[in-house]
Amino acid sequence: MAKVRPVIALVLAAVLLGLGPGPVWADDCAQTGVTDAYQPQVWEVAAAMDQAAANQLRFDQYTTIPDLGKGWPNPTPVPGTVPAILLKAIGQVESRWYQAAYAVPRGGFGPPLTPSGGCAYGVMQIASGMTRPGELPTDVQRRIAREYAYNIARGAVMLGYKWRFTPAVGSNDPAVPEHWYFAVWAYNSWSYRNNPNNPAYPWPRSPFDGSQPRKNYPYQELVYGYANNPPYGRWPKPSPALVLPPREWVGATTPDNAPEWVPDPRTIALSTYRVVLFAEPGGAPARAAVGITNPSGGSVGWRVVGKAGDWLTYSPGSGTTPGQLALTANPAGLGNGVYTGRVDLVGDNRPDITVSLTVEFRVGTFYRTLMPLVGRGP
């Protein structure tokens, strides 16, 4: 299942998630009539988060995570799940794990939490489908306002939809929290407002850990900051810590000009992930060089762990960042055609993550001049 291009993401998200046009005022919100929302205990929220993340709180179609795409550039459908650590951190940012108004004690009942005075309800601050009466079935709107588990499950579904309509990261694996960077961004607002390069946020800024003013950070940095620094030990601290893509990779991203893919920020990065080389049959070899860096900064070792393509050689076989990998494509013995090879590398910081470089070798004048350069991604 391929991700939908970001240009049309907002249109499709609006259809699927019930986003309303124009400004929303409190009087326009779904009038649920709920006054007896249960204020869950912390352990009840944690348990519901784990279940919702695993798609085990399927009360109905509105609380069932859809299949997600895994892999890039040709994703395949996999059962929908979301990383529990991100769901918990989103809940922390949104409500501090409250379903009812803050004045209602845990274990008690009272009006649902709508702290902004708008149409966002409960633990996950669900606003989509809640901005007008009838946007969702009335019983669904009431359950979102009243029931913490239903609210959390709906939030997991919304996050899953964001995965389907936002850019891919790395190998596009839903099991990897870092690969949800753009989806988490979009959970709040898929707009330039949450771009880490937005001058509204000071730079340089230290990673968010829960102690700094929230206004100084885009939404997704708040979420990943809490994920790495769980308040009151509400979930295990991840090791290694979750990392974010460098700001340079994000650029001026908005829904209208978002990249389709960015590299995995957890390990070494390449200056390009696809190289196209040209040669004539029996002619001179073609050469290129690819830069290797560490997105987290500093020097880290790297090494080549695999290769495909007998016509392809590389040098050196290992090194440290920043560095270069030299490629040579030899047309000896090859006829006219297009040949595809690959070089696989790992960084010593995360030897469990393979970084692949695709090498396309076009042999013959026809393939140099008449075939377009197409494709992108790892």
Image: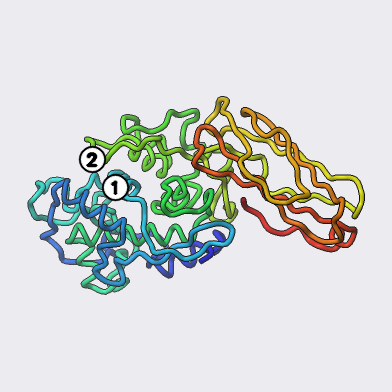
Q: Which residue is mark 2?
A: 234
Does residue 375 appear in the picture of this structure? yes
Circle 2 SS class: loop
Q: Between residues 319 and 297, which one lies in front from this camera angle?
A: 319
Expressed as whole percent of the image width and height from the top left, the position of residue 108 reads 7, 52
Q: Between residues 156 and 191, which one lies in front from this camera angle?
A: 156
Residue located 78% across and 53% down the image: 361
Residue located 76% across and 46% down the image: 312
The three-letter code of the residue at mark 2 reads Arg
For residue 312, side relative to residue 127 (left or right) = right
Q: Which residue is mark 1?
A: 88
Residue located 57% across and 62% down the image: 74
Expressed as whole percent of the image width and height from the top left, the position of residue 126 reads 30, 58
For residue 276, side relative to residue 21 (left or right) = right
Residue 211 disc label: none
The quadrant where residue 206 appears: top left
Circle 1 SS class: helix
For residue 292, side relative to residue 12 (left or right) = right
Expressed as whole percent of the image width and height from the top left, the position of residue 103 reads 12, 46
Residue located 38% across and 57% down the image: 159
